[in-house]
Amino acid sequence: MVAEIRSGVKSTTDGLRRARALNALRQRHPLTATDNGSLSLLARNAREGAKNSTWSPTDSDERLLNEYFDRVFPLQFPFYVASVPERGHGWLRSLMRRCEPLCYAALALAIVYRNSSSDRVDVLHGPSREHEQQQLYALAVTGLRQHIDRLSKKSLQEGLRGGIEVFACVTYLIMLEDDDEQVEAAAKEASSIDSSLSLVDHVAMEFFSAVFLWLDTLATVSTGRRPRFADVCAAAFGAPDCKVRLRSIMGCENWVMIVIRDIAVLDGLVRDEQGGHPHPRRGEGVRRKYIELKDRLQLGLAEPWESYLSLLARGTKDSAAAEHRLIQATPIVTHIFACAAMVYLTVVVSGRPDPHNPEIRDAVSRSIRIFRALPDDIHVQMLHGMLWPFCITGCMALKDQESSFEYLALKAAGTTVVHQGPDTLWRALQVMRTCWRIRSGQSLEGVPSVDWFSAMSTLGYQVLLV
């Protein structure tokens, strides 16, 4: 859903390029206008170098923020479960009031959801509305960028709390623009956090650092680069006393993300070999690492998941219980990510993205079986939270399995035809279809040689599958 903004333009600080980008946004998929109350408030506060004073939203803004937390946030993080100290979304609301650009971003995302689910046919019409759409988008993106730049100039002592805000701002900037340039700056600015921080800051740090490292790891299949913070990821998710539990944020256990991280690093070593930079011991090291990672995945895949599916299928009419229902999905989500990781590992090491490979074929078949068994009432929510494994396994589907992935995507879209818009689900399906089409043309030429990365290259864009 957030891709309806993210894939629009690549905004820059240069005025001319920004104007052209905003025009591209308008031409392709403009944001619809917010009500005048919210927009006028945003306009009044669109001043360079926003002050550190706490922002006091109007009633109109509060309604829109409620809409974000009630409808949009659950789509972005369908498996998020707040602990007792976190008290729901209260910590994030507090952070947004303290960091005004985050409010702009939440308002922009709420507007996108409102209009994407609206039946009004006139919602995108009119030059004044289009101007307001551009203005709201620019306020969100520019505000986030300015806040990041401003915090980077603070001293270490001043920047302890600011580092947390950098993580939050970069995360929302990625949602809006798929911006990868600010990632290293975020890690540097948030590298030192002390114990004197408030509960809000501690909760925000754990949440946004986890999301940030998650994005950095999963982006490797789209960008072809190694994760920038592989060591940080291992320390954050792999330590025995680790406080960050991905199952309560992203729905899967920490171990599978560590494995995906290790595969991404291994992918970099393999690419070095293929790129003419051989190392006398690298080939042997790759083989040893492959065996180790394969064993770890097989051990994880041996864990049963079927009983959890029956618990998930029972459902509930109790809103409080329904909010925590997806906790029971953790073994299922972890299993699906492990299947995709096995596909990823096999393609990386073999250098042959062949759907007939027994390990790939088995992992894809497992994934289809689980995806099809998901309860209808939470199918959409869960699939949007698992686009990465859905696309990875779907790209390696056999000819007679392609229709299953097509059906699952159409079911999640709630229509018989996935609309040709910038939605991430549609883009993931386009990547899969491109894989299938190219592979079909290669059927007479021998071994298939197309995967998700080459399909994205053919399409001319990269998809951050989150």
Image (cartoon, grey):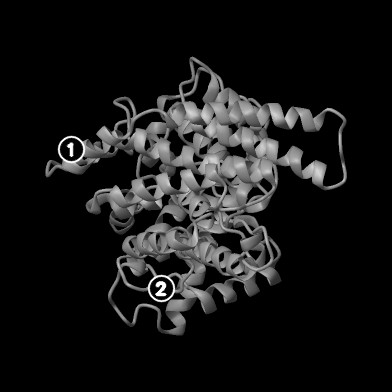
Q: Can residue 195 be seen at all in this image of the molecule?
A: yes
Q: Which residue is mark 2?
A: 419
Above or below, 340 against 11 in this view is: above
Which quarter of the picture shows residue 184? Answer: top right
Q: At 29% from the left edge and 36% from the top edge, which residue is drawn?
A: 306
Residue 152: where, in percent of width, then height? 67, 39
Residue 123: where, in percent of width, then height? 35, 78
Residue lying furthest top: 241
Q: Residues within 10 Å of mark 1 (few under 14, many from 20)?
A: few
Q: Amino acid at mark 1?
A: Ala
Residue 204: where, in percent of width, then height? 45, 33
Q: In terms of depth relative to the viewer, which is nearer, 91 or 27? A: 27
State left or right for residue 264 relative to residue 51: right
Q: In terms of depth relative to the viewer, which is nearer, 89 or 35? A: 89
Mark 1 or mark 2, earlier in chain: 1
Residue lying furthest bottom: 126
Label of residue 320 in the image: 1
Local secondary structure at mark 1: helix
Q: Residues within 10 Å of mark 2 (few under 14, many from 20)?
A: few
Above or below, 229 against 407 in this view is: above
Q: Dividing the image into 4 quarters, which one contains the N terminus?
A: bottom left
Local secondary structure at mark 2: loop
Which quarter of the picture shows residue 324? Answer: top left
Q: Can residue 189 be seen at all in this image of the molecule?
A: no
| Mark 1 or 2: the one toward you | 2
Q: Amino acid at mark 2?
A: His
